[in-house]
Image (cartoon, helix red, strand yellow):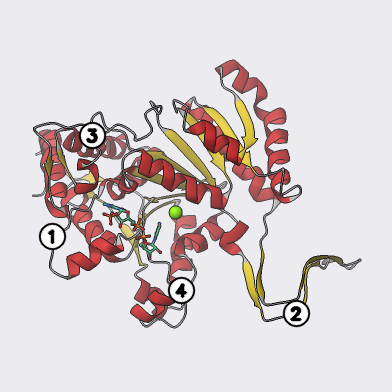
């Protein structure tokens, strides 16, 4: 099925292909939902784990550089190799997480927002509105250095000033036995841009901003995040928030976790890198399914990278390879593309492209609301005689049919 007058996307989009089940769905989404309607140029990077291995992971760096050039990228889920994966794919080494590498190059904040449909109620009954997670995407554990300690000895933190001057040293631990250590870092510039991105995003979405760390325990590292947020708020946002009837609220991470379970939602919850990784999966799963969570990396320079928040759905892929039909949900992958296309349309001032993105999202949501859904949603959707579990491809086909109807004026 193809349209004569395809919608022109004027600037190339950086496409990053991925692994396993999401790679299979990625291709279906492109072929059935995008290419029939769009005349677009894709700057393609294959982040399949084998190709990352062949290029010594330089393909990941090249993809990040391309996002700097074109400003908008769309990424499929990718394997972050561990020891098992190194064996499975016969890799040279356990390459770093591509997301970590890309975020390290682009800096920025990841915003994750659940896709809401009328027939899927969050597991947490108090949640009436989306909880958006703003995850700092630089530093901390994701660019750590860590070490196994073989036996007795002293582990220290050492800072050597570049311009000379006295070294700073602190003892981490006097080991009497084998153990482990880890060094992490962050920069003021990155935390400041994280804070600015969150204050901007919350105001834009007209929601309150929460921020939480463990500054009672981490009196320098986490406290520094808190101080920078407070300073940023007081200097640049207080009046705007007051005028908009919005609040900025800081609380300890464990208090925030307890409160969020009883809150109605409709807030942006800003979190450090690891906290955001963990909490966004919790919010996604409690909102219905991991596959109903969108994710965008917003860099301080105005680069945007859209992806699904979930992984490569490895278990489904093994079943797919064994010849079984899976019922894997492509919603978040579709929304990665629509997010990228809408942003492309906005930057290029091509409203038809943004409109296509809206229409595709409507078609996808409409499909789920009509009762046609994948297995992950069937268990959480409101019971209805019309509900029907379909397989991976049939779900995309149903969305394609819906989209085709909505766009048929264009034939
Ligand atoms: P996962 O791929 O997110 O899947 C975990 C489970 O969540 C699945 O087994 C499935 O549950 C459910 N699920 C996730 N996405 C789904 C979808 N689209 N449709 C239906 N169900 C879905 O996490 P993982 O299995 O821990 O990780 C697999 C690989 O992904 C790993 O190699 C990891 O490194 C990588 N990963 C990549 C990213 C990324 O690129 N952004 C993020 C996370 C993980 P059931 O099995 O119960 O059906
Ligand atoms: Mg995660």
> Can you tell which quarter of the image residue 130 is in?
top left
Q: CA distance from mark 4 to mark 1?
A: 32 Å
Front residue of 348 and 172: 172
Q: Nearer the viewer, mark 4 or mark 1?
A: 1
| Mark seen at residue 362 | 3
Q: Tag 1, which secondary structure?
A: loop
Q: Nearer the viewer, mark 4 or mark 2?
A: 2
Front residue of 21 and 388: 388
- The earlier-in-sequence mark between 3 and 1 is 1
Image point 27% across, 45% down: which residue? 331
- The earlier-in-sequence mark between 3 and 4 is 4
Circle 4/circle 2 CB separation < 8 Å: no
Instruction: Write down the residue under mark 1.
Output: 325
- Answer above or below: position of 113 versus 159: above
Q: Tag 4, which secondary structure?
A: loop
Circle 1 residues within 10 Å: few <14, some 14–19, many ≥20: some
Residue 63 place in picture, x, y as percent: 43, 63
| Mark seen at residue 152 | 2
- The earlier-in-sequence mark between 2 and 3 is 2
Q: Tag 3, which secondary structure?
A: helix
Quarter of the displayed picture in which ligand 1 can be seen = bottom left
Circle 2/circle 3 CB separation < 8 Å: no
Front residue of 86 and 165: 86
State whether residue 30 appears in this view.
yes
- The earlier-in-sequence mark between 4 and 2 is 4
Q: Residue furthest front?
A: 176
- Answer above or below: position of 260 versus 51: above
């Amino acid at each position: 099925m193809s349209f004569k007058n395809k919608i022109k996307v004027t600037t190339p989009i950086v496409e990053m292909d991925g692994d396993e089940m999401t790679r299979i769905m990625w291709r279906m989404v492109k072929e059935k939902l995008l290419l029939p309607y769009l005349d677009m140029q894709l700057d393609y990077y294959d982040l399949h784990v084998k190709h990352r291995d062949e290029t010594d992971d330089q393909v990941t760096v090249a993809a990040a550089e391309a996002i700097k050039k074109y400003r908008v990228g769309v990424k499929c889920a990718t394997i972050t190799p561990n020891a098992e994966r190194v064996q499975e794919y016969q890799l040279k080494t356990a390459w770093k997480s591509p997301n970590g590498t890309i975020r390290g190059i682009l800096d920025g904040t990841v915003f994750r927002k659940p896709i809401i449909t009328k027939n899927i109620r969050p597991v947490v009954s108090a949640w009436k509105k989306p909880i958006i997670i703003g995850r700092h995407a630089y530093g901390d554990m994701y660019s750590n250095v860590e070490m196994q300690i073989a036996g007795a000895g002293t582990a220290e933190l050492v800072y050597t000033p570049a311009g000379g001057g006295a070294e700073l040293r602190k003892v981490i631990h006097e080991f009497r036995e084998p153990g482990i250590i880890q060094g992490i870092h962050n920069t003021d510039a990155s935390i400041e841009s994280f804070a600015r991105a969150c204050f901007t995003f919350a105001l834009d979405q007209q929601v309150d901003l929460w921020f939480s760390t463990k500054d009672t325990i981490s009196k320098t590292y986490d406290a520094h995040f808190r101080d920078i947020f407070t300073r940023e708020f007081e200097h640049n946002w207080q009046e705007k928030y007051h005028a908009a009837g919005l609040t900025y609220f800081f609380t300890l991470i464990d208090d925030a976790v307890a409160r969020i379970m009883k809150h109605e939602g409709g807030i942006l919850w800003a979190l450090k890198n690891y906290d955001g990784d963990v909490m966004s999966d919790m919010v996604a799963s409690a909102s219905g399914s991991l596959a109903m969570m969108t994710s965008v990396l917003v860099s301080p320079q105005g680069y945007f990278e859209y992806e699904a928040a979930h992984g490569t759905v490895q278990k489904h892929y093994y079943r797919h390879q064994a010849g079984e039909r899976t019922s894997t949900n492509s919603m978040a992958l579709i929304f990665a593309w629509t997010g990228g296309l809408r942003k492309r349309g906005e930057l290029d001032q091509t409203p038809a492209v943004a409109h296509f993105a809206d229409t595709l999202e409507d078609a996808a949501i409409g499909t789920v609301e009509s009762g046609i859904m994948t297995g992950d949603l069937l268990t959480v959707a409101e019971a209805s005689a019309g509900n029907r579990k379909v397989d991976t491809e049939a779900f995309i086909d149903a969305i394609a049919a819906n989209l085709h109807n909505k766009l048929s004026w264009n034939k």
